[in-house]
């Protein structure tokens, strides 16, 4: 029997512990995460009061006035969707079928052998597609649970695949000396990797470098991948946005499939339809036959269900309207080309302005690179110098060409000339 004195003292200790617990928050031990590079740029840009400041950190298209751009075809498709007064029931786990069917045709081509053996799901844009793919590989890939990504790659790739439970390896991609593709290094790494490794390829408009292999180089990469029995995972976040032509930009994806690779693919409609915040994408796996497709499809559903149950419907309906309505589709193709052309023009203007200023530096990489981003080859110190000139971009030397306009290109060239010569 405990004496009443001991009980009272135990109660007092317990009460002290409870109030100590109340004083220290449950999350007191959560450490501060490292600062986000893009957020840092946005904040520095906002704080700068200089009227001619330039933000080249954003990963979204801007029109020639530097404003966000909603595609007219998207507005028309959205009007149609709203006017149809559809209900707001849940989509199935793999999304809106009219959307996924059309997305597959867009990526693989209308006459692709992949279409009738393709397991496809709508996804939370390109990032979500990569995450489902990472999970699928971790669960079912018969080889090592690892993936090779290019060095450098989109900053989120490594995080997405690590969180999927994969080990992330790097393969050579960028040649600092030429500010171009390290093709020999890439092939050497493909050849060096354990047979049956998984390789992630940017289908077009490589982010962050803007450097893509040529069709001839893709053919050699395909051969090397086949010889080593590797598996290819394509990330196509910019179809149409790179060259202005959806077929040209899908070359690598379609070539690998034609050569017998049962690839998997992450698609995004953020850039080519400007549907950034609608989060519209797709993840697909080319299967051996219809029976395999059925099994893979069932497992994709098992992955998606506990992640987010089913995807949002609004953006998928807009994209489906565009892809399935011939007039809207034609209009969209033109708008994609206009966006790509504006970017190509800004590249040429930047190079021209630098040359006019008397820069002796070779700027040909600015125009040979493709897509939203350009790797300038500027050092972190030179990028800090640019910030002093009120030009903001990531310190790896990447600039978003979408942020350049006819009005600011002259000042941008002057700022680059000042820090680089
Ligand atoms: C190479 C690459 N993959 C995937 C994405 C995913 O974008 P989102 O999730 O917005 O579709 C991006 C976005 O910048 C990208 O650059």
Image (cartoon, grey):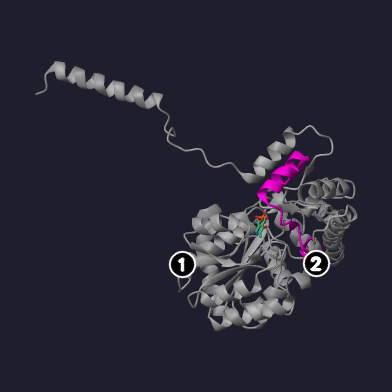
Instruction: Give the residue at x 86% y 60%.
Output: 348
Mark linked to residue 243: 2
Q: Secondary structure at mark 2?
A: loop
Q: Residue furthest top?
A: 5
Q: Give the x, y percent position of residue 336.
A: 82, 61
Q: Answer left or right for 373 relative to 294.
A: right
Q: Give the x, y percent position of residue 362.
A: 80, 62
Quadrant in the picture for the N terminus = top left
The reply to whether discs 2 and 1 touch (Cβ–Cβ < 8 Å) is no
Is 117 drawn above or below residue 405 in the view shown?
Answer: below
Q: Nearer the viewer, residue 42 or 131?
A: 42
Which quarter of the frame holds ligand 1? bottom right
Q: Nearer the viewer, residue 249 or 320?
A: 249
Instruction: Give the residue at x 42% y 33%.
Output: 26
Q: Is residue 366 magenta?
A: yes
Q: Quadrant of residue 310?
A: bottom right
Q: Answer left or right for 344 relative to 165.
A: right
Count of numbered circles on the image:
2
Cβ at disc 1 under 8 Å from ligand 1: no
Query: How far, Cα to Cα, is label 2 from label 1?
Result: 34 Å
Q: Secondary structure at mark 1?
A: loop
Q: Nearer the viewer, residue 356 or 118?
A: 356
Q: Does the image show residue 289?
A: no
Q: Which residue is mark 1?
A: 145
Q: Which residues are magenta?
A: 365-393
Is 284 drawn above or below residue 91 in the view shown?
Answer: below
Q: Give the x, y percent position of residue 235.
A: 64, 65
């Amino acid at each position: 029997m405990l004496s009443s004195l001991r009980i009272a003292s135990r109660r007092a200790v317990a009460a002290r512990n409870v109030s100590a617990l109340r004083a220290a928050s449950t999350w007191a031990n959560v450490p501060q995460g490292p600062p986000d590079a893009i957020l840092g740029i946005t904040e520095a840009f906002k704080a700068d009061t200089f009227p001619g400041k330039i933000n080249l950190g954003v990963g979204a298209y801007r029109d020639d006035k530097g404003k966000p751009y909603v595609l007219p075809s998207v507005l028309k498709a959205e009007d149609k969707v709203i006017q149809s007064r559809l209900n707001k029931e849940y989509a199935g786990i793999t999304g809106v079928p009219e959307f996924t069917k059309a997305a597959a045709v867009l990526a693989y081509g209308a006459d692709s052998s992949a279409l009738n053996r393709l397991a496809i799901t709508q996804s939370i844009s390109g990032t979500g597609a990569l995450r489902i793919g990472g999970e699928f590989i971790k669960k079912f890939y018969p080889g090592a649970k690892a993936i090779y990504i290019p060095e450098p790659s989109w900053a989120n790739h490594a995080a997405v695949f690590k969180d999927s439970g994969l080990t992330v390896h790097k393969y050579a991609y960028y040649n600092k000396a030429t500010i171009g593709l390290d093709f020999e290094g890439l092939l050497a790494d493909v050849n060096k990797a354990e047979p049956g490794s998984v390789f992630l390829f940017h289908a077009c408009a490589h982010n962050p470098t803007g450097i893509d292999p040529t069709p001839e180089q893709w053919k050699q990469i395909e051969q090397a991948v086949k010889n080593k029995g590797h598996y290819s995972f394509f990330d196509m976040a910019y179809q149409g946005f790179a060259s202005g032509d959806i077929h040209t930009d899908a070359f690598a994806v379609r070539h690998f499939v034609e050569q017998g690779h049962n690839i998997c693919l992450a698609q995004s409609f953020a850039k080519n339809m400007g549907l950034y915040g609608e989060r519209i994408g797709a993840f697909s796996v080319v299967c051996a036959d219809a029976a395999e497709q059925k099994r893979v499809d069932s497992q994709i559903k098992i992955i998606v269900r506990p992640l987010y149950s089913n995807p949002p419907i609004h953006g998928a309906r807009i994209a489906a309207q565009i892809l399935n309505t011939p007039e809207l589709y034609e209009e969209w193709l033109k708008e994609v080309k206009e966006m790509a052309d504006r970017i190509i023009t800004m590249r040429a203007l930047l190079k021209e302005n630098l040359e006019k200023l008397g820069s002796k530096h070779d700027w040909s990489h600015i125009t040979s690179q493709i897509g939203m981003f350009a790797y300038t080859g500027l050092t972190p110190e030179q990028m800090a110098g640019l910030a002093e000139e009120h030009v903001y971009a990531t310190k790896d030397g990447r600039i978003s060409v979408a942020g350049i306009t006819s009005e600011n290109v002259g000042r941008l060239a002057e700022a680059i000339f000042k820090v680089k010569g």
